[in-house]
Image (spheres, rainbow, N blue to C red):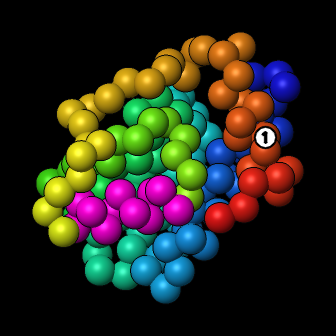
Amino acid sequence: MIPYSEEWLRLPAAYAAIVARALGDEAATWWDDPFDPRDATICLTDGTALVWDEETGWRHGGFVSGRKGERTVLSGMCYLGGGVLPEPARVVESLALLREGGNADAADRPTYRSFRDYDDGFDALLAHYAEGLVTA
C-alpha cells in the first residue's frame, strides 16, 4: 500500500468503527483524521472521548473540542496502554478499568512507533480491519 494514497489514509477508519461498535451505546459519534499521525476520535455519551493515533494508541479524557480535520483536544487525559492497536474488546476493558480507578497497562505518553515507519507491518494489521477479517 502506498503511503498517503486514499486507501492508505482510510485504513484506520475501519479499526475506529469496530472499536466504536464494541463500545455499544456508550459511543455517541466518531470520526477519523488521516494526517501525521493518522488518528480517530470516539466521543462518548458521558462527555468524554477516546482518541487513537498510530503512534501512541488510545487515550481518554474530557472532550474539549475537535472534529474531522481538526485535532481533538482532551482534558485530564490518560493513555490506556496496551499497544498501538489493541483488540477492540481490550479497549473497552481498558476504559472500564480506567474508570474504576486503575489500569495496570496505562502509561505516560507511550510511543509504540512513528507515523513515518511505513514498512513495519502496521498497515497490514490495519488492513485486516479494513477487509473485515478481524471483528469485535
Task: Say which residue appears at 76% left-offset and 31% top-offset.
Answer: 124
Task: Say which residue appears at 24% left-offset and 46% top-offset.
Answer: 104
Task: Say which residue appears at 24% left-offset and 52% top-offset.
Answer: 103
Residue 95 magenta: yes
Disc 1 crowd, CA 10 A, few/some/many (<14, 14-19, 20+): many
Badge 1 element: helix
Magenta range is 89-99
112 or 93: nearer the viewer? 93
**Please, is residue 97 above or below residue 28 in the view?**
above
Quarter of the image holding residue 117? top right
Quarter of the image holding residue 56? top left
Give the residue number, with chain letter if any, for mark 1: 127
Task: Say which residue appears at 29% left-offset and 80% top-offset.
Answer: 46
Rendered-image quadrant of the C terminus: bottom right
Return the residue found at the far front.
104
Q: Main secondary structure of the magenta part?
A: helix
**Please, is residue 61 above or below residue 5 in the view?**
below
Rendered-image quadrant of the N terminus: top right
Q: In the image, residue 100 lies at what x, y percent?
A: 18, 69
